[in-house]
Image: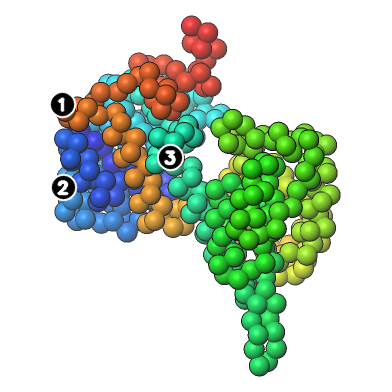
Amino acid sequence: MRIAIVKESSASEPRVAASADTVRRYLGLGAEVFVASGAGLASGIGDGEYEGAGAKVVADNAAAVAGADIVLGVRRPAAAALAGANRGALVIAIADPHGQEAALGEIAGTGVSLFAMELMPRITRAQVMDVLSSQANLAGYRAVVDAAAEFGRAFPMMMTAAGTVPAARVFVMGAGVAGLQAIATARRLGAVVSATDVRPASKEQVESLGAKFIAVEDEEFKQAETAGGYAKAMSAEYQAKQAALTASHIAKQDIVITTALIPGRAAPKLVSADMVASMKPGSVLIDLAVERGGNVEGAVAGDVVTTANGVKIVGHLNVPGRLAATASQLYAKNLYAFVETLVDKGTKSLAVKWDDELVKATLLTRDGAVVHPSFAPAAVTAA
């Protein structure tokens, strides 16, 4: 059983799919591990560290993938990059399949089985494989660190001989994994924190972290969560009511962090240009949804915009990648936990249970076709 660890093709992706620790674990499963040279450098893992763990470091991705039974990456590889992998090889990555029908079709044509780690179901036995949570947790933390770096004042209240410094006011919009970590981090830094979310269960979570909960708690709010634990898209009427409530609140805030995303959809606009204009000069908005269009009007992906009234709108891309070493460590463990379920430990060979709920939820392509019901062509889905 041969496992390939590829180097990410994009310079904007510093993470890597394996750590030295997970390499050792793959060897324990009976695998040979081939790592493309330089794959881990941006995450602080040198070729020597992989070799010390027992991996074979090869010249490039093509050499790593040649003859591979499993290909592990962070982002979905291009179909051309999978040339040389065994037919039926398992390719496991964050596949970003929404709106990518052509790319999925090309990968299907290579004969590999592509798995999307972000589609892992949110059930108890899959918690250790939940890449969305592991990476969002870091994004929430980093959002507060980035806000502190852009904010020209201290976070905690300070009583000094020269006078009292008031605590910064931080408002977190969206109390999922990223939002809750942002709340906790801002509280640790001494800020006065408030938060909002459309999911009823989030109120208790927000308040348990010492933040104030802000929301329109009507009947629609009480049903605003999917069975999978995600926020539902809210009606225009609810959004208008919520916007009215938050508009006056935002005007009093020093820092606003937005985290609202719905899988497969453009990010909802939560902060209008008028709301931004109401904020004090020197205030900071961190938009964690900028890669999906952004929650903040005026946010620019990959840039920091300063408005006419002196408010900074921060739109960093790949925020977990800004903590590449830690993000890679957690992502590598997510991957290993999933791969372990695909291997027969007795025979030390691949033994994929195609009817397993984890496999069915994450499998995008198999035997030359796109097979996931949410992304397969209509004729295949009907069959």
Decide: is 142 above or below 129: below
State how far apart marks 3 and 2 are (Cα).
Answer: 28 Å
Tally the numbered discs.
3
Residue type marked 3: Gln
Front tag of 2 and 1: 1
The location of residue 186, given as percent across then percent down, is 59, 64
Nearer the observer, 197 or 136? 197
The location of residue 313, given as percent across then percent down, is 67, 59
Q: Which of the two discs, 3 and 2, labels the residue nearer the N terminus?
A: 2
Which labelled disc corresponds to residue 127? Answer: 3
Which labelled disc corresponds to residue 157? Answer: none
**Helix, strand or loop at disc 2?**
loop
Q: Residue at x 67, y 48 (%)?
A: 203
Q: Residue at x 68, y 92 (%)?
A: 162
Nearer the observer, 224 or 21? 224
The location of residue 309, given as percent across then percent down, is 78, 66
Decide: is 26 above or below 369: below
Are the two marked residues, 3 and 2, in contact with CB atoms closer than 8 angstroms? no
Q: Which of the two discs, 3 and 1, labels the residue nearer the N terminus?
A: 3
State how far apart marks 3 and 1 are (Cα).
Answer: 26 Å
10 Å crowding of disc 2: few (<14), some (14-19), many (20+): some
Q: Which of the two discs, 2 and 1, labels the residue nearer the N terminus?
A: 2
Image quadrant holding the N terminus, namely: top left
**Helix, strand or loop at disc 3?**
helix
Q: Which residue is mark 2?
A: 54
Q: Which residue is mark 1?
A: 347
Task: Give the quadrant of residue 147.
Answer: bottom right
Q: Residue at x 49, y 35 (%)?
A: 122
Q: Residue at x 75, y 48 (%)?
A: 215
